[in-house]
Amino acid sequence: MRIIVLLSSLGTGGAEYSTLTFYGWLLKQGHNVKLICYKKANPSYDPLPFGFDQIQYIAGNTFLKRIKSLNAIINEFKPQLVHSVLFEANLLTRIDHLMNRKFIHLESLVNETYSAFRLLDPNITKLKLEGYRLLDRITQRKGVDHFHANGIAVAKHYQEKLGIDPRRITIVPRGRQANPFVGDVLNREKLRGELQTGDRLMIINVARHEFQKGQDVLLDALDKLGPLKEKIQIVLAGREGNLTPLIRHKISAYKLESCVLILGHRNDVNALLAAADIFVFPSRFEGLPGVLMEAEAAGLPIICSDIPNNREVAEENRNALFFAVNDVQQLSETIFKLARDKELQKKMGTESLAVYEQKFSLEEVHQTMLSLLEKLTQSA
């Protein structure tokens, strides 16, 4: 197959990681894959470890010029299929596809863009969000041949919000590689020494600093733990963003400097997860959260917000404890419960590994995605 993969950027997010991982694997299977990005991002993934020795960026400083740039690339490469991921890449490919019907356009649905919780974000207005939704709804009708959704909840979200026919959506979940640091005592001692964890309980959150990810709720909950918080270290790993000023303000206001560590973007997330004791994920809305799979692959007990997307990955009272979105008191009580029960931590961690192995084997996910691409290109 000849395929162009168009990403909005190589920013360090789950959608980007999953796309690079799959298409790097597809390259190794002998298929011809060209990687293109709409724009540059910082921080970003290095495409080389995924198997891409070159990447091309869309040229031009206006949307029209970018359309011409993409069209020129498509006419030269002559792909059977263009797979776009994230809004800017999706919209660009849709418009080009309306003018150039010589390729199949597959688009990934990876997040709940129009979640009601987004309207609580101070950076989002209802008028702006509805404007995007209208544009999204209109252009998807003729601009996309088929959709790939990374989860059931995500598929239902877009069926409702954009009126997409369910027959145009194929659900293929994300997968993750096994964590090579599980059981590695030296890695655990090394990282916990560097982070000055000592004998404290290390609770880790891995996510970019955005309203969606809810690190502010985690800090509010930590403040309510009383003396127990002195026995806990909260580690926040993920690139800075719109929520960073609020995170830093809460750390200062609650006097949490001694027990909260902001690491920023890290390239050793697997090692960090394997060195931690509990994974906490207070997201307000999600796609299919790959980082929850990574926490499972690391054998961590999980505390996460009670949204359908998280329930597709983690299993209540098996490897995860759930709390209501934005419920600071319930999150605090849940942390208190798990932090004080070493046996429960161990049991849930063991179950996390089992859930990962049963549901998120990377090889199986790759084969399912490959079957979808073959079906689409053969029917063209």
Image (tube, rainbow, N blue to C red):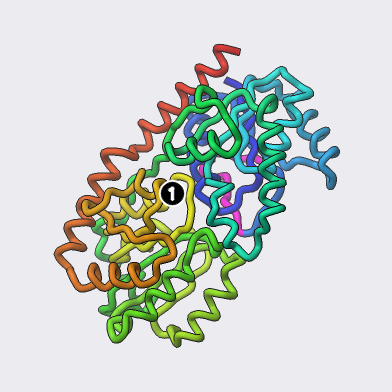
Please say whether residue 187 is visible from this viewpoint: no
Please say whether residue 10 is visible from this viewpoint: yes
* Relative side of 188 to 175, left or right: left
The residue lying at 36 percent from left, 63 percent from top is 280
Rendered image quadrant of residue 96: top right
Residue 266 horizontal/vertical position (percent): 49, 62
Q: Quadrant of the N terminus?
A: top right
**Residue linked to disc 1:** 289
Write down the region rendered in magenta: 43-55
Residue 200 horizontal/vertical position (percent): 28, 78
The residue lying at 41 percent from left, 27 percent from top is 367
In magenta stretch: residue 236: no
SS at mark 1 in the image:
loop
Question: Does residue 260 lie above or below 308 as drawn?
Answer: below
Nearer the observer, 48 or 333: 333
Q: Amino acid at mark 1?
A: Pro
Residue 333 horizontal/vertical position (percent): 29, 71
The residue lying at 50 percent from left, 48 percent from top is 14
Q: Residues within 10 Å of mark 1 (few under 14, many from 20)?
A: many
Question: Does residue 355 lie above or below 28 as drawn?
Answer: below
Nearer the observer, 359 or 25: 359
Q: Quadrant of the C terminus?
A: top right
Residue 182 horizontal/vertical position (percent): 27, 55
Furthest residue toward left: 343
In magenta stretch: residue 52: yes
Nearer the observer, 372 or 253: 253
